[in-house]
Image (spheres, rainbow, N blue to C red):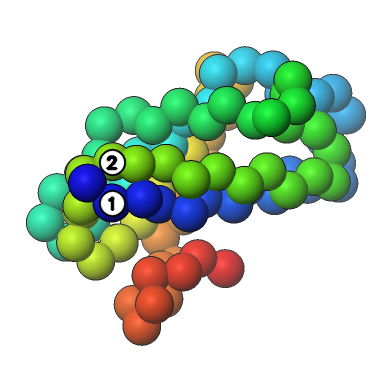
Amino acid sequence: AVNYEIEVETGSEQEQPLDAPVYLQIFGSTTTTPKLFLEPKNTAFTKDSVNKFTIPSNNVGQVRSVFLSHSVDYHHRSNADPANDRWS
């Protein structure tokens, strides 16, 4: 198992806090994680906020993409920096 450092930044156009379950999946060069649920320290993801998580899961190899979802909408990121597996 490895620890993934996850940082989620919410946008400025969000009007209501997001209190729906939020999860992500990490797709790598060798495998994929299961759904990893994000539980913020506060009660919801709020406008213009940054939530940080350390999540243990299986090693996926080099990160290729991340799927972030909640019950209303989803966002897919595929711009990993292969040099250090960080997302921007």
Callout 1: SS: strand
Residue at x 80%, y 24% (from the top left corner): 17
Question: Going by the image, does 40 lie left or right of 21?
Answer: right
Quadrant where the image shows the C terminus: bottom right
Residue at x 75%, y 26% (from the top left corner): 42
Residue at x 55%, y 18% (from the top left corner): 21
Count of labels in the image = 2
Could you say which is closer to the camera, residue 50 or residue 41? Answer: 41
Q: Which residue is mark 1?
A: 2
Q: Which residue is mark 2?
A: 57
Vertical position of residue 37 compared to residue 51: above or below: above
Question: Going by the image, does 28 lie left or right of 53?
Answer: left
* Residue type marked 2: Ser
Could you say which is closer to the camera, residue 38 or residue 65? Answer: 38
Residue at x 40%, y 52% (from the top left corner): 4
- Indicate the position of residue 56 as horizontal and vertical percent values: 34, 41
- Indicate the position of residue 47 as horizontal and vertical percent values: 84, 38
* Residue 44 lies in quadrant: top right
Residue farthest left in this picture: 30
Of label 2 and label 1, which has the lower sequence position?
1
Crowd band around label 2 with a 10 angstrom C-alpha radius: few (<14), some (14–19), many (20+): some
Label 1 near label 2: C-beta < 8 Å? yes
